[in-house]
Image (spheres, helix red, strand yellow):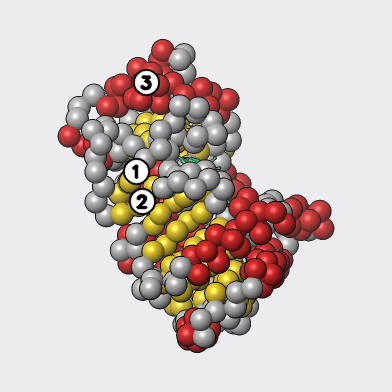
Amino acid sequence: MALIVQKFGGSSVANATRVMHVAQTITDTYKAGNDVVVVVSAQGDTTDDLIEKANEINPKGSKREMDMLLTAGEQISIALLAMAIEKIGCPVVSLLGWQAGFHTDRAYGAARIESIKPERLQSELDKRKIVIVAGFQGINKADDLTTLGRGGSDTSAVALAAALHADLCQIYTDVTGVYTADPRKVSNAKKLTDITYDEMLELATLGAQVLNNRSVEMAKKYNVEIEVLSSMVKEPGTIVREVAKMEKMLIRGVTKDTDIARISVVGMKDVPGNAFKLFSSLAAKNINIDVILQSVGRDGTKDISFTCARANAEQAQELLEDLFSDEGAVVSSDTTVAKVSIVGAGMQSHSGTASKMFGALYEAGINIGMISTSEITVSVLIPKEDADKAVAAVHRAFFG
Ligand code: ADP
Ligand code: ASP
Ligand code: MG
């Protein structure tokens, strides 16, 4: 007998038929003699719809109230899924995040799990019940509900698998695994048999939404093996683990991120400490920055450009205007850009990977704005309107 954590995303439980189908998968696993803990997301587009409702009333509503609202989506789906399992005739109980022991920090909207106290959950398992847990939510020290950030149910599942020392953590979704590019956008994308934590973390961070990046971070930290598979099509998925077969692949995948902005500070003083001042002020506001470019100083001034999440662009621009307009610098924000990246540990031992990517973009007539590299990634900034074309061209260059 094994302890299995299964997570089902929003599209997998979007309507009554799908909820019944998922209930069947869960009860089959249970009837095979396993203990089953299920994490489930809000149905279909529920979370987006709730955000829209909030915006109709007050687009500047507090993050606390936003979390109070958004946690409702998952409350609906756990109850419906539990009822579906009752109908099949298996013992089941649904639990909200706090009932399952998810304690987080105070950061509403982007809370981090601080601890999981699974006593209640464990006692339900001991009674041989299937336990359905609301994903994406927890409770903080003020006894307020919090959410973990968009796509956070993946993190709930991995965290539970770690806390319960589960034998397996299955992430069921609407594609059959992790592919070399988004299979909905690139028709000849190839499914990966397995992939390392480090590669998956980069893919997720650089735009492959199939797994939330924090969930991969957590899986690596606690050595939780993840299987990403389809809730509709029965076939083996992709395993995410520490070591993966290389399958002679130079790169593992091509991603795009269109949810970014480029912020430029032009004409700041070329003196020691200005870059520190700029980036530390952003860090203090928890604004993550990515690709950075600094110009060579001229006439005592220099320019710094960087990218951040589009949602942070306005705040970043205001912050930097406060800091640098006195010295004559001009701050601008551009949301018409996208980042296209390649990821793969294979490129460490091969030269020419970056140039192959740049060549593919050149042949597709796409201009590169900024470039950044790490050991296992190369990212370029390009016009947003070219993003899909760029992914297709780069994918073709590496995978034919
Ligand atoms: P869920 O609702 O199950 O959490 P998501 O929508 O968050 O599902 O993630 C699944 C989606 O991720 C797929 O429908 C697919 O379009 C997208 N995706 C993007 N990049 C990739 C990739 N490299 N491999 C697989 N899916 C990807
Ligand atoms: N329902 C949340 C969202 O849409 C969490 C999740 O799906 O993982 O972001
Ligand atoms: Mg998701």
Q: Amino acid at mark 2?
A: Ile
Q: Comparing marks 1 and 3, which lies closer to the viewer?
A: 1
Measured from the top left, where is residue 221 in percent x and y?
Answer: 32, 64
Measured from the top left, where is residue 55 in percent x and y?
Answer: 76, 54
Residue at (47% x, 85% y) in the render: 126
Residue at (17% x, 34% y) in the render: 349
Vertical placement of 111 versus 320: above or below?
A: below
Residue at (55% x, 74% y) in the render: 130
Dot 3 alpha-carbon crowd within 10 angstroms: few under 14, some 14 to 19, many 20 or more? few
Element under label 3?
loop
State if disc 1 and disc 2 touch (CB < 8 Å): yes
Element under label 1?
loop
The numbered mark, 2 or 1, whose residue comes first in the sequence reads: 1
Q: Amino acid at mark 3?
A: Gly
Element under label 2?
strand
What residue is disc 2 on?
Answer: 239
What residue is disc 1 on?
Answer: 193
Q: Amino acid at mark 1?
A: Thr
